[in-house]
Image: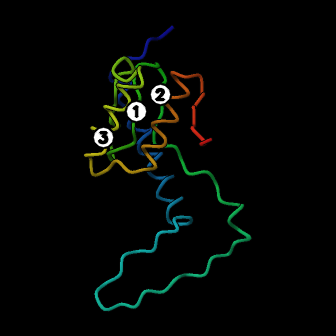
Amino acid sequence: MNTPTSEDRDIESCRWVADTRKRLKAWKEEWDPIPKPLRKGEPFQFEPVDFATLGEMPDRPKTVRVDPEGEYIDLAAYPAAPYSIELERIDKADKLVRWLHHLTGKTWFDYHMMRDLIETWAERFQGGEMWIHRGL
């Protein structure tokens, strides 16, 4: 059985990031509802929404994963390489909150990635269970 080297991990991780970013860009071009920025003086116009096709929208590609060796959580942050966090550094809920606080200071970290990170963390450490308070 061949054990992957750190170089193999780096190459595979970079391929994953490149593929994820390419799929995410294609998804955004077709499905992102946020209008493009306007130039000064341009009138704002809403584009018509075809509600019949909204149900056909494909899932947005995940931007976070546990690497194949199960040692890191990788975030598709940069065009060429992942932002990796060792699993032991994010294995408890309080550590997750600290990481979320740290990552929200990064310009590339958005709410989609935050949601993917929380879901990936819950799958890994909580068996997919996410407790959600729905009120009384």
CA gap between label 3 and label 1 equals 13 Å
Residue 106 percent coordinates (x, y): 26, 46
The image shows residue 32, relative to residue 116, as above or below, that is below
Residue 94 percent coordinates (x, y): 37, 25
Contact? badges 2 and 1 (CB < 8 Å): yes
Residue 86 percent coordinates (x, y): 35, 22
Closer to the chain start, of discs 2 and 3, is 2
Identify the residue shown where x is 51% and y is 65%.
Answer: 32
The local secondary structure at tag 2 comes to strand
Quick check: 20 left or right of 56? Answer: left
Q: Which residue is mark 1?
A: 74
The kind of residue on which mark 2 rests is Val
The kind of residue on which mark 1 rests is Asp
Display colour scheme: rainbow
Quick check: 45 left or right of 80? Answer: right
> Dot 1, crowdedness within 10 Å: few (<14), some or many (≥20)?
many
